Amino acid sequence: MRRLRDLFDPFLLLLISMVLLASFLPARGHGADILSVAADAGIVLLFFLHGAKLSRDAIWNGAKAWKLHLATLGTTFLVFPLIGLAMGHVDAIPLPMRAGLLFLTLLPSTVQSSIAFTAIARGNVAAAVVSASFSNLLGIMLTPLLVALLMDKGGGGGLVSLSSIEKIVLQLLLPFLLGHLSRPLIGSFVARHRAMLGRVDRGSILLIVYSAFSAAVVEGLWQKVSQMELALLAALCAIILVAVLLFTWGLGRVLGLPREDAVVLQFCGSKKSLATGVPIASVLFPASLAGPILLPVMLFHQIQLMACALIARHYSAKIAASD
């Protein structure tokens, strides 16, 4: 059962439930307006908590491995977007999902799963904390900027407006900064109630997903997307992941990184954050487009968990065999 939990994220089942609920009972009219306000409040709370969780000690303790962190950030915000631009030429899937593939490649790395898999593979956990935290911190600013620069080329159609930038500042950056500045006051509370706040995090994401897919369903999402297109989308997500896993594996050897740091590069460099992607998509894109744009992010999330769980166990077994 534990291995099944490693391969299949239980939270994904809740996300799928929200998609199904939105598909059969989408929020409409006044209810949709109330839900939109609640989702915006959830985004503010989510990024406030992200800021409050960010430990300065962890950053300073692991920041010495600068070569590793530059390689990870370069993979996340340069190599991935180049692959995303290439995927924009796949005409077999609808335009919004192509935009979603590009958006996926512009997201920062995950935090929890990157650190967890690094620990399983007996890598440099402190460096993983730093790489993943830096990636998420920069992603709040870099992801919207990259969307503004690249989405026209990748099929997004110029979706970032001045009002979107204002929402980024008010709903993402400002709450994040306030949360981090409040850490001396609330840091001990956050540490004591990490499990409860984790449920608040996930509850906010579920609310945002339901709101985004409700709007997309009302606009006729499932009349525009076929099962074959969904299968092709999943295959493209898998191809992206395999390409980046191979790239990070090779880059670690080219740079001569120690085994523990090479593990960090592979796991932090190959991940994309669902927890960050959902609220950013909700802020950046019109409600009717946020749903289909998030489909690749949700598919990639599960594929990366399954693949990295297997790789982490393989690395751990190799170390155990050599001990």
Image (cartoon, rainbow, N blue to C red):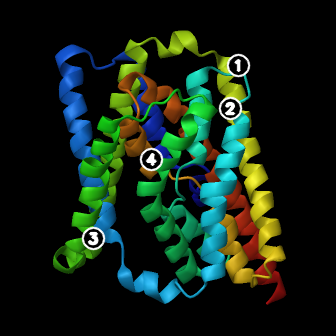
Amino acid type shown at disc 4: Pro
Q: Which mark is residue 88?
A: 2
Residue at the (62%, 33%) spot, across then down: 154
The answer for how far apart the CA atoms under marks 1 and 2 are is 18 Å
Label 4 packing within 10 angstroms: few (<14), some (14-19), many (20+) = many
Choose the circle earlier in sequence order: 2 or 3.
2
Mark nearest the camera among 4 and 3 is: 4
Q: Which mark is residue 144?
A: 4
Q: List x then y, in percent, for residue 217.
A: 42, 17
Q: Secondary structure at mark 1?
A: helix
Q: List x then y, in percent, for residue 259.
A: 75, 82
Does residue 295 appear left or right of residue 35 in this picture?
right
Residue at the (45%, 31%) spot, across then down: 159
The answer for how far apart the CA atoms under marks 1 and 3 are is 44 Å
Residue bearing the label numbered 1: 228
Choose the circle earlier in sequence order: 1 or 3.
3
Residue bearing the label numbered 3: 180
The answer for how far apart the CA atoms under marks 4 and 2 are is 18 Å
Looking at the image, can residue 243 be seen? yes
Mark nearest the camera among 4 and 1 is: 4
Residue at the (52%, 84%) spot, across then down: 63
Amino acid type shown at disc 3: His
Q: Quadrant of residue 103?
A: top right
Tell me if label 4 and label 3 are in contact, CB under 8 Å: no
Q: Is residue 158 above or below residue 85?
A: above
Q: List x then y, in percent, for residue 196.
A: 27, 61
Q: Secondary structure at mark 4?
A: helix
Q: If the image is split into quadrants, where does the C terminus sit?
A: bottom right
